[in-house]
Amino acid sequence: MSFAQLSNIPFSQFTERFSLDRLRTDAGSLQNKFSNIRPPQEFFDIKRLSKPTNFGDLQSRISYNLKYYQTNYAIIVSMLSIYSLLTNLLLLFVIVFVGLGVLGISKLQGSDLEIGPLKLTNSQLYTGLLVVALPLGFLASPISTVLWLIGASSVSVLSHASFLEKPIETAFEEETV
């Protein structure tokens, strides 16, 4: 890309995407999410575990608990994701291999890779990466890993949300006078 082509890009679009205010807002919202983590004593309160009495109670519990413990549930899903990658090392290798391959090719900034008399273009490098990563990706069974992750996350989160009673204080808030 030449300088003339770069100068045609509106500078305002660049500054809007990478403004400090936007970065502060994003960092603030992430910090706000982590401040919503409920303590383990509250999250694992076995005194509040009980079977829902009816379907309405089940819906009410799930709705309340998904909102109230959403950060804790996100941490559980993240931990299950890490576990699934650590137990499927081939998938982890493929993800790291493709990530580093794309990073390495992008470091060339469009120029060809020259190794002695061999000269490879960017499209040849990406094709080579695809030819190696695609069969490895099929062997790593990412679809079954994702389906396991969805199932394990659903069972963990929904069972906690459905069996944990809402606090007594919420019963008084729901009453209408």
Image: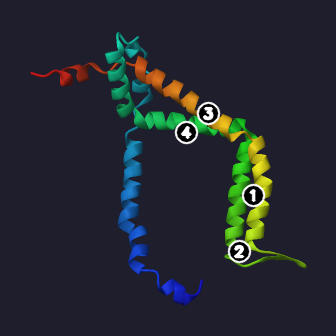
Q: CA distance from mark 1 to mark 4?
A: 28 Å
- Amino acid on which disc 3 is placed: Leu
Viewer-proximal residue, 45 or 175?
175
Residue 144 falls left or right of residue 34: right
The residue at the point 47 percent across, 21 percent down is 159
| Residue 147: mark | 3
Q: Position of residue 47 (x, y in %)?
A: 39, 13
Who comes first in sequence, dot 4 or dot 3? 4
In the displayed orientation, state which residue is furthest to the bottom: 4
Could you tell me if the residues under marks 2 and 4 are in contact, i.e. CB atoms within 8 Å?
no
Q: Residues within 10 Å of mark 4 (few under 14, many from 20)?
A: some
Q: In what quadrant of the picture does the N terminus appear?
A: bottom right
Camera-nearest label, 2 or 4? 2
Residue positioned 41% across, 74% down in the render: 13
The residue tagged 1 is 130
Provide the secondary structure element on which disc 1 rests: helix
For label 4, the residue is 78
SS class, disc 3: helix
